[in-house]
Image (spheres, grey):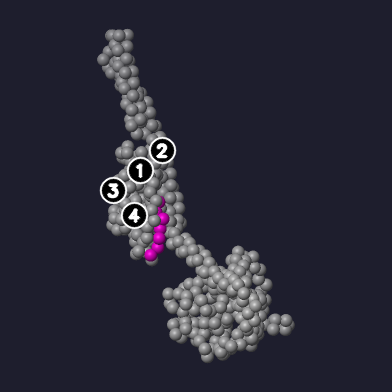
Amino acid sequence: MKDLERRVWLMTFAALLIFVVYETIKTLLFPHMSVIASHVITVIVASVMTFFVSRYALSRYSGALSEIERQTERSEETNRLLSAVLATMREGVVIVNSDTRIVLYNAAAAAIFKLPAKSAGETSGAARSFAANGKRDSETATRSETLPGSQALLPPELAQQRLVEATRDPAINGAFRRALEKKTSIEVRVEMADFEGRSFQLNVAPLGPRLAVGVFVDITQLERLERVRREFFANLSHELRTPLTAIIAYSETLLGGAMDDRENNTRFVEKLHKHAARMSDLISDISDLSAIESGQVKLTPGPVRLKNIVTEVIALLEARRSGCNVSFNLSIPDQLFVQADRTRLEQILYNLVDNAVKFNKPGGSVAVTAEPAGDRAAIHIEDTGAGIAAADLPRVFERLYRADKSRSRTTEGTGLGLAIVKHLVHAHGGEVSAESELGRGSRFTFTLPLAQQPETGSHS
């Protein structure tokens, strides 16, 4: 705009000089010209010069206005794109000015800080009016080139609430202040107690001379997975150490002379075999779980009569656990067919029913029931054992997690059965859940797609 004014002034001054030169030449060359003729010629020349100067000025102003309109359109388009990008981001984005007032934020940040969601990522009406006004100062014009189309261009009187009003967390406010003062990037971990106890990785960076942008990345799930990974390796080490310690102890006893002890050597060898078998089962389950999680296990689903599979699994368990002193109650319709891989369905049922037997009380019972539920079959395995604490219930399907630490030392099993069940049920397109009450037993439920009864008797 200043360049345009300078050009118009130069053009006007040039026209004035030309007019002075014209008048001087006219007076010198035509000294006897009448006053009327002189005035007429002067008016004509002045009119022609005024026309050209005005046309030049108007053309320049017209070009400047067109450029302002183009810049305004680009600014509005950039603002729309910025709003769309911010709206689709899962990370919270907050931009503050040098007074730590929030001037721009997206919907994710609105949820974190309980800010008005309707204005998240949008430029206010005052801002649009201000942006459309051609009377911008040079500083604002410079900032508009740096960050077009955002609320960060608002003048101080149009800025919104302070950051400290949105959050009282000293780590967040301190990070933004340091980024503004030191003009350097800051990275901190913050916990939002009033936002479902979630953890965020906050990265704050200076944005121009008077702004700072903060990005809140939700790392709650990553931290949970890291915690589960650490617990898994700790539990795996414990599960392997127990049989290994027993194997080493019994083998050293045998090598120390117990080999010739006819009364005890057979018992020691049986103990060795038992703990070696436990390690073998653990490694086998780890291998199975790894293959299932990586998608290497291919299912061959087909119509399967559910009652027959459950009957076979219960018969196998009764044979293996002849002294378990637990009764079985079965209530499954004869014509209930499910779409499942027969081998993997047996594995699911065996793990669930075996757990119901292992964690039951002497003289207890295990009930296996099933019924159609829409386009699926719901299968329930219920026991009368000690139950599971409410705090442990959400984690029972984790690998190697044991709700009752004291019983884990005496109860056989690898601790991977329920994790395998969860992944196999999901692979079939079903869901699995657990309900329990301390002292009254547990109830595990999983669903499988229903299947039509086959015409042949191949799936009995």
N-term-proximal mark, 2 vs 4 = 2
**Closer to us: 451 or 48:** 451
As measured in the structure, the alpha-carbon distance from the residue carrying label 3 to the one carrying label 2 is 33 Å
Q: Amino acid at mark 2?
A: Glu
Report x, y in % for residue 137.
31, 39
The answer to whether mark 3 and mark 2 are in CB contact below 8 A is no
As measured in the structure, the alpha-carbon distance from the residue carrying label 2 to the one carrying label 4 is 41 Å
Find disc 4 in the rendering and name its residue: 172
Find disc 2 in the rendering and name its residue: 67
N-term-proximal mark, 3 vs 2 = 2
What residue do we see at 47% from left, 64% from top? 227
Find disc 3 in the rendering and name its residue: 99
As measured in the structure, the alpha-carbon distance from the residue carrying label 3 to the one carrying label 4 is 15 Å
Report x, y in % for residue 332.
60, 87
Q: Which residues are magenta?
A: 197-203
Report x, y in % for residue 232.
51, 66
Q: Amino acid at mark 3?
A: Asp
Q: Is residue 131 left or right of residue 232?
A: left
Residue 252 falls in image quadrant:
bottom right
As measured in the structure, the alpha-carbon distance from the residue carrying label 1 to the one carrying label 2 is 34 Å
N-term-proximal mark, 3 vs 1 = 3
What residue do we see at 30% from left, 16% from top? 20
